Image (cartoon, grey):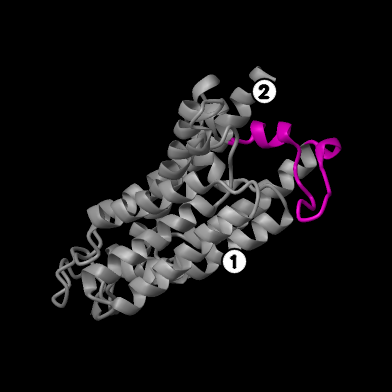
């Protein structure tokens, strides 16, 4: 199952056509190493992205359970805020915002915050969107580029929210303020929507563009109606996802460098959670 395939035909990781396991170039799309050095069958079973979607889903669930377990006395249950982890545990594991980023210098939390959630409804709602949008974006961009877009959008969303909170909170322009503390996978979710909008425009696919933009508008409106929603994280995530998708150019095939970058960003995200926990213990 985990052996390298040295002979026979495999599927090109970019265009889906049959190629030789050891072909240097795909004669259909031009991708170099289309069989991924013979490991294409294994990577295909994992989703080419080494299981990125599963990694996100189970990672968020695991961190949510841990944040509940670390500080059971801090858990609150009121209305839609059922099973809300305590602020102490959320801070320890990497909540972002103006206070952590600018006052405490915890800049890496713009990565870790996208893996934390504020209550049971919050995580269920977000993971439903991840499960729907990430595979679609992976199919259109290639899953390595999808993972890059997801991570860049996460960082962009929480950077914008933290910055706006730092600049405008407590000022006459308080309506422009972002969040003092913020978290959740909605920033990268909006990044996936931004990427889908870009793809539709590049390919002339009005259906993809209108559907993705429709989802984004609905979620933005929902954010203004519901209290405690970080709309600046959503906006930053959308801009970050759109910009990253444009730079990665979905009209060109994926490269090996995309796989390497995706894996590096996944590792950096995991390290951001670890660093948040280690450094947070020194601050509390």
Q: Position of residue 163 (x, y in %)?
A: 45, 31
Q: Is residue 160 left or right of residue 186?
A: left
Q: How far across and down, in percent of the image, does residue 161 sit?
A: 48, 38
> Circle 1 sits on which residue?
128
Left or right: where does residue 82 sit relative to residue 118? right
Query: What's the residue at 59%, 66% (across, down)?
Result: 128
Q: Which label belongs to residue 281? A: 2
Q: In the displayed structure, would residue 274 be above or below residue 60?
A: above
Circle nearer the N terminus (1, 2): 1
Image quarter in which the C terminus is found: top right
Q: Main secondary structure of the magenta part?
A: loop
Q: Residues within 10 Å of mark 1 (few under 14, many from 20)?
A: few
**What is the secondary structure assignment of the residue under circle 1?**
helix
- Up the image or down, 247 lies above or below 160; here it is below
Q: Is residue 46 visible?
A: no
Above or below 180: residue 51: below
Q: Is residue 145 left or right of residue 122?
A: left
Residue 73, magenta (yes or no): yes
Q: Is residue 101 above or below residue 255?
A: above
Residue stretch rendered in magenta on the structure: 71-95
- Give residue 96's position: percent from left, percent from top: 55, 35
Task: Between residue 231 and residue 72, name the one nearer to us.
Answer: 231
Q: Label 1 to label 2, Cα distance in Å?
A: 32 Å
Q: Residue furthest right?
A: 73
The residue positioned farthest toward the front in the image shown:
172
Q: Position of residue 218 (x, y in %)?
A: 51, 65
| Residue at 29% across, 67% down | 199
Q: Which residue is more in the foreground, 105 or 36? A: 105
Please state if 252 lies on the left or on the right of 50 as rendered: left
Disc 2 crowd, CA 10 A, few/some/many (<14, 14-19, 20+): few
């Amino acid at each position: 199952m985990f052996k390298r395939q040295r002979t026979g035909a495999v599927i090109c990781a970019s265009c889906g056509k049959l190629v030789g396991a050891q072909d240097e170039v795909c004669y259909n799309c031009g991708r170099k190493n289309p069989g991924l050095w013979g490991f294409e069958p294994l990577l295909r079973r994992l989703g080419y992205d080494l299981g990125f979607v599963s990694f996100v889903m189970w990672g968020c669930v695991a961190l949510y359970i841990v944040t509940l377990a670390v500080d059971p006395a801090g858990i609150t249950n009121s209305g839609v805020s059922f099973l809300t982890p305590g602020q102490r545990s959320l801070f320890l594991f990497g909540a972002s915002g103006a206070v952590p980023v600018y006052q405490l210098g915890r800049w890496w939390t713009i990565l870790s915050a996208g893996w934390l959630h504020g209550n049971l409804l919050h995580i269920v709602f977000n993971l439903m969107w991840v499960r729907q949008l990430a595979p679609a974006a992976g199919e259109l961009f290639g899953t390595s580029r999808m993972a890059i877009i997801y991570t860049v959008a996460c960082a962009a969303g929480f950077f914008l929210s933290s910055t706006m909170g730092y600049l405008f909170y407590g000022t006459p322009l308080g309506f422009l303020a972002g969040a003092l503390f913020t978290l959740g996978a909605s920033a990268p979710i909006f990044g996936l929507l931004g990427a889908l909008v870009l793809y539709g425009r590049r390919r002339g696919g009005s259906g993809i563009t209108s559907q993705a933009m429709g989802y984004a508008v609905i979620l933005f409106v929902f954010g203004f109606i519901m209290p405690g929603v970080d709309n600046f994280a959503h906006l930053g995530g959308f801009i970050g996802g759109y910009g990253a998708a444009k730079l990665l150019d979905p009209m060109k095939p994926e490269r090996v460098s995309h796989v390497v970058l995706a894996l590096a960003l996944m590792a950096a995200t995991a390290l951001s959670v670890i660093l948040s926990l280690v450094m947070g213990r020194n601050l509390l």
